[in-house]
Image (cartoon, coloured by chain):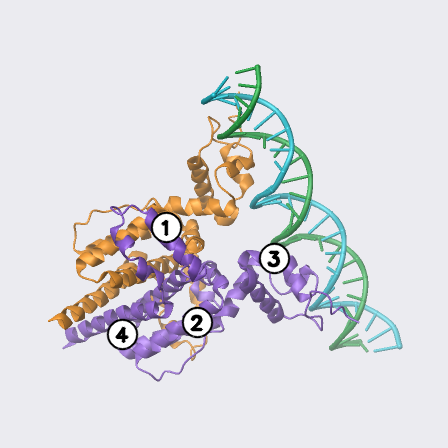
Chain colours: A orange, B purple, C cyan, D green
Amino acid sequence: MEGSTKPARENAGPVSRRMVLDAALELVDADGVDALSMRRLGQVLGRDPMVVYRHAAGRKELLDGVAELVLDELETFPDDLHWHGQLRRIAHALRRVCLRHPNAVPLLVTGSLSTPLGLRPPGTLRPLEQILGILIRAGFLPADALHISRAFYGFLYGHVLNELQELIADPEENEALLRLGLQRLPLRDFPHLRHLAPELLDYDGEKQLEEGLDILLAGLDQQLAVRDKSYT
Amino acid sequence: MEGSTKPARENAGPVSRRMVLDAALELVDADGVDALSMRRLGQVLGRDPMVVYRHAAGRKELLDGVAELVLDELETFPDDLHWHGQLRRIAHALRRVCLRHPNAVPLLVTGSLSTPLGLRPPGTLRPLEQILGILIRAGFLPADALHISRAFYGFLYGHVLNELQELIADPEENEALLRLGLQRLPLRDFPHLRHLAPELLDYDGEKQLEEGLDILLAGLDQQLAVRDKSYT
DNA sequence: AGCCATAGGCCTACAGTGTAGACAAAGTAA
DNA sequence: TTACTTTGTCTACACTGTAGGCCTATGGCT
């Protein structure tokens, strides 16, 4: 006799924290972070909105949970390749996860802003630990490995943010807008930007990431070479 | 006879868009983005909340304005140094601005997510144009300069985000938390992280940025060298 | 002088928000 | 039985963004 006509989609048994987070992520994916309200969440769960509070302390904690859920989708790789290849693989994996949940990226980037590294969920720290291992095995000092891993993460998140704001509108409309927008800029003040119109139009996120990695890894190679040379 | 006892602080003449944005930034700086509500803003301005809508289309547009205001604080430099030095200077300038308005950084990073590059306010595009110029004069092809500038920006924003989430709590409490948090991690799964406790404790944002720049610039140097060599 | 247009400011009202607190039903242990 | 914990529900409160209308002062024009 349950209303299968209702917009609610799950009505069996008690709700688990996992169910709540799944529904929340679903809402975020569909309509963005702002669209995630307790009431709408309750509607999706087919329960009273207040149920959520049994599994999350509040909206903020709920969003933290969503971020963690997204990060858990990160694939994990065995340490087999050359360290360049391993870092590249991790980078592309993170990029893929972010592209799969573009609306959740703000949570990843600024959400963990509230939790100091020490007490983040272990799942979140695993990739960091892996990167540290890769770098140390590659020959870096542990302390340097830490700094490098931070730069690496910074670069990755930065790239993803860049890429996300590049694919907001459909390309057709984008092309017109871009051309118009560029023409608005005075040529004498923005000569380079004005001439780069064609390159601005075909943004390829994967390629762009790859080129960034090229630069970064080349820099790391040299840093490693300098250190080794000073040891002889 | 105006109430100087009132919490309001400005009561003379008509409000300008600039006054609204200044007050908004003030609120954001003081209590974070969430604390910026139309009503509180009206209170600061000493006017009815609805006045704001005469100068901004809505809350979102208002926040965009705040972000733009913050970016306008970016110092601009003459093109005199070696390109390495120039890029370093820009990087540090952006970092300083972000540290001055930590609560506004989410707006910078995700806010412009809604405006495609073409029609962003010119003030926002000026640094990009400058970086393009620097790279092109350094010998890179325009198209490469574009890709590099994107990587550069990505790296910068990523670094700032990293740094901001490193200085949330005061260092004393942070130390205790970190030690406790680390001990919670199983040693066999997180050997490197566990051993890096001391290095995790003294995070120096400026130095970390400098090291990231070292890597990046070294990578760019090599890329430039390879290109030049292939020309001979 | 008279008049109108316009802009800036104010007020009300509405739908929607997060969440504290009390209460009901149902399972579980003693 | 009784007592207690969990899980879901309901109500209520303080707050949010903002649409629409109205009032008033200021300017320019005839």
Residues packed near mark 3 inside 10 Å, few (<14), some (14 to 19) or many (20 plus): some
Regarding mark 2 in the picture, which secondary structure is present there? helix
**Above or below, comparing residue A33 to residue B127 in the picture:** above
Q: Which mark is residue B181?
A: 1
> Which comes sooner in the sequence, label 1 or label 4?
4
Q: Quarter of the image containing the N terminus of chain B? A: bottom right
N-terminal of the two: label 3 or label 2? 3
Q: Earlier in the sequence, mark 3 or mark 4?
A: 3
Say if labels 1 and 4 share a chain: yes
Letter of the chain that mark 4 sits on in the rendering: B
Q: Which of pointers 3 and 2 indicates the residue nearer the eye?
A: 2
Residue at mark 3? B37
> Is residue A153 visible from the viewing direction of this image?
yes
**Which residue type carries mark 3?**
Ser
Report the mark closest to the observer, 3 or 4: 3
Residue at numbered disc 2: B96
Number of the front mark, 4 or 2: 2
Nearest the eye: B128 or A70 = A70
Identify residue for label 4.
B140
